[in-house]
Amino acid sequence: MKNIKLLYSLILLFTLGSCTNFDDFQIDPNRTTKGDPSLLLTGIQISAFNIVSTDAAFASRQMVNVEHNNTYQLYGWQRSGFGTYNNLRQVLKMEEEATLAGKTAYAALGKFFRSYFIMDLTRTFGDVPYSEALKGSTDEPIFTAKYDKQEDIYIGILDELDEANSMLATETGTISGDLIYDGDLSKWRKAINALSLRILITLSKKEGNSNVGVVSRFNAIVNNPSQYPIFTSNDDNTALPYYDLDGNEYPYFNSNQIKTNYYMDESFINHLKDREDPRLFAFAQREENGANLPEDDFNAYGGLPGSDLASANSARVSQGEGSLIAERYYNDPVNEPSIAIGYAEVQFILAEAAARGWTSGDASEHYQNGIRASMEFYNIDSAAINMYLSNPQIVYNASQGIEMIITQKYLSFFMNSGWEAFYNQRRTGFPEFSTDGPGILNDGMIPKRWMYPESEIQSNRENLEAAISSQYPNGDTVNGDMWLLKNE
């Protein structure tokens, strides 16, 4: 493990301090051009899974910035970028080296990461380059890639994940350069299938689409555990660990911003207080007005409205209101790993699928498993977990099943899993995010997407304009409904 930590440090420095295109390095023609895919794997994992994000917490009504009017908190964002394609270049390079070295396991992981990154791109924008992407250096180079339909993209990445699972099924031994599972390929198969389940539940509005076959694909995974193993505990989490080593610490370690200006959102605090959820004590500090109350007193905690201006929330802070995020998020260099896909999420996915009638599973059991897994991740003791699960407000009610499942899933995503909380709310409407405050931009609406990057207007205008016109009648706006969000 010491070697992995050292490798982590070296690769992180390499990733942050160098170009993303390996062609930029001078090559000695007298030496072999073969590389070791394990070195590329480490950097790819850091890029993919280092996703702890306060921006996502602001947009998901979990935190509030009192220093200035935050764009994500007030729903005023516009464009995003295609930087993820730089990560995909490294994935393609790893696959090339894996093929040259005859290392099938790395090629399989390449399919996983390609699906992971493309999924991130398409749910951000809608249609994006996929089939023709990153072919500028091939024998028949393509410098202006067409945009694939989102439906075709989802079919493609689901097929790739299925192939990746099959490829690893016949592999034995371990791999090197793996920060996540220390080379354990059996756990990577679980991660691959967990990502497939996430993608399939993301397609809940397309359950009647015969081209995708959402329900049949879902059942093929959950009904065949030997062929499609999935997570069985938090030990299986796809999670990037942090270390008390320079450059490898928790992302917000020693951050003065998070220490002084990042408070808990009022609605998020109320979700926890109303349910007497002990995770509150792991997430937040007592507000100044509650400083004399015990740390386990729910009345000692309070939040600030995310839809208000920073000046108004700052004034409330001066009156002793508002709980800061827990100290461990900026004082502990290790804190907790960055979950990319977790066991709790998988259990909530299974619960939702059962509640929708996709499977014969027990929605209540999976729902409880998800809550327990989340609480165990935050080190809540078993007695408190059992008490919480017996709370009549928490006991599963099938008539409110989807809302209860998604709300608990939302609570479990605090400071992990990137933008999953936001994307789940976008898909289901749960929980409701307030937009009625004076600070809200975008005409009081929550954006549904990001506009395409300016660079595409300059370098790939024809394909970009074709993609926009085929998807969004009102043009490239943040309020357009991508295929993913339309009911079928």
Image: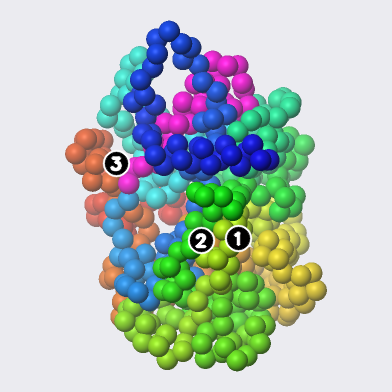
Task: Name the kind of residue labelled 3 in the image.
Answer: Ala
Residue 116: tell me if it is visible.
no
Question: Label 2 to label 3, Cα distance in Å?
Answer: 41 Å
Compare residues 373 and 392 and report the one nearer the observer: 373
Amino acid type, residue under disc 1 in the picture:
Asn
**Image coordinates for residue 225, horizontal then vertical, percent:** 75, 41
Residue lying furthest top in this view?
30
Q: Amino acid at mark 2?
A: Phe
Is residue 422 magenta-colored? no
Residue at left offset 52%, top offset 72%: 325
Look at the picture and state if 139 lies above or below 355.
above
Mark 3, residue position? 467
- The residue identified by callout 2 is 253
Q: Secondary structure at mark 2?
A: loop
Reply above or below: 270 against 329.
below
Say which residue appears at 47% left-offset and 71% top-offset.
259
Local crowd at mark 1 within 10 Å, few (<14), some, or many (≥20)? many
Identify the residue shown where x is 73% and y is 27%. Answer: 173
- The residue mark sitting in front, 2 or 3, is 2
How far apart marks 3 and 1 lie (CA) works out to 43 Å
> Which stretch did the figure color magenta?
81-108
Question: In this figure, what is the number of numbered marks?
Answer: 3
Name the spot of residue 290 as percent of width and height, x first: 56, 89
Q: Earlier in the sequence, mark 3 or mark 1?
A: 1
Q: If the image is split into quadrants, where does the N terminus sit?
A: top right
Position in image of residue 59 (x %, y %): 42, 65
Q: Which residue is mark 1?
A: 335
Image vertical order of residue 361 relative to residue 187, above or below: below
Callout 3–callout 1 Cβ contact below 8 Å: no
- Mark 3: few/some/many CA within 10 Å (<14, 14-19, 20+): many
